Image: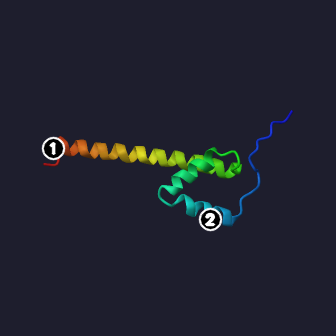
């Protein structure tokens, strides 16, 4: 017995991708949209996978920025550049 997912397997057009990229680049709205696209069952599989990958890259980026700022602050607090 085959297991069918309720997600759509249709290929997205260039216009759909352009709209997706524009919406995902809007602050706050983009993050909410990415979460909806990543975990909604009605989202096409290619769009859901893209949204999950983009969310993961954003989390990695935020963690890297926090680590760099923490390192920079600790270096200045230790007085290495006085």
Percent of width and height locating residue 60: 46, 44
Label annotation for residue 79: 1
Percent of width and height locating residue 19: 62, 64
Q: CA distance from mark 1 to mark 2?
A: 48 Å
Residue shown at the point (68%, 65%) measured from the top left: 14
Q: Give the label, 1 or 2, closer to the camera.
A: 2
At mark 1, the secondary structure is loop
Residue shown at the point (52%, 56%) measured from the top left: 29
At mark 2, the secondary structure is helix
Residue shown at the point (41%, 43%) measured from the top left: 63
Residue shown at the point (29%, 43%) measured from the top left: 71
Q: Tag 1: Cα neighbours inside 10 Å, few (<14), some, or many (≥20)?
A: few
Hey, which residue is sitting farthest left in the picture?
Answer: 82
Visual colour scheme: rainbow
**Is residue 73 placed above or below 17 in the rendered structure?**
above
Asked whether 42 or 67 is in front, the reply is 42
Q: Which residue is mark 2?
A: 18
Q: In terms of image quadrants, where is residue 21?
A: bottom right
Question: Left or right: where does residue 49 sit relative to residue 25?
Answer: right
């Amino acid at each position: 017995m085959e297991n069918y997912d309720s997600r759509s397997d249709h290929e997205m057009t260039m216009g759909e991708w352009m709209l997706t990229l524009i919406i995902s680049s809007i602050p706050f709205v983009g993050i909410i949209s990415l979460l909806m696209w990543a975990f909604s069952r009605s989202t096409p599989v290619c769009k859901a996978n893209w949204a999950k990958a983009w969310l993961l890259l954003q989390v990695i980026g935020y963690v890297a920025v926090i680590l760099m700022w923490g390192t920079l602050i600790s270096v200045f607090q230790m007085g290495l550049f006085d």
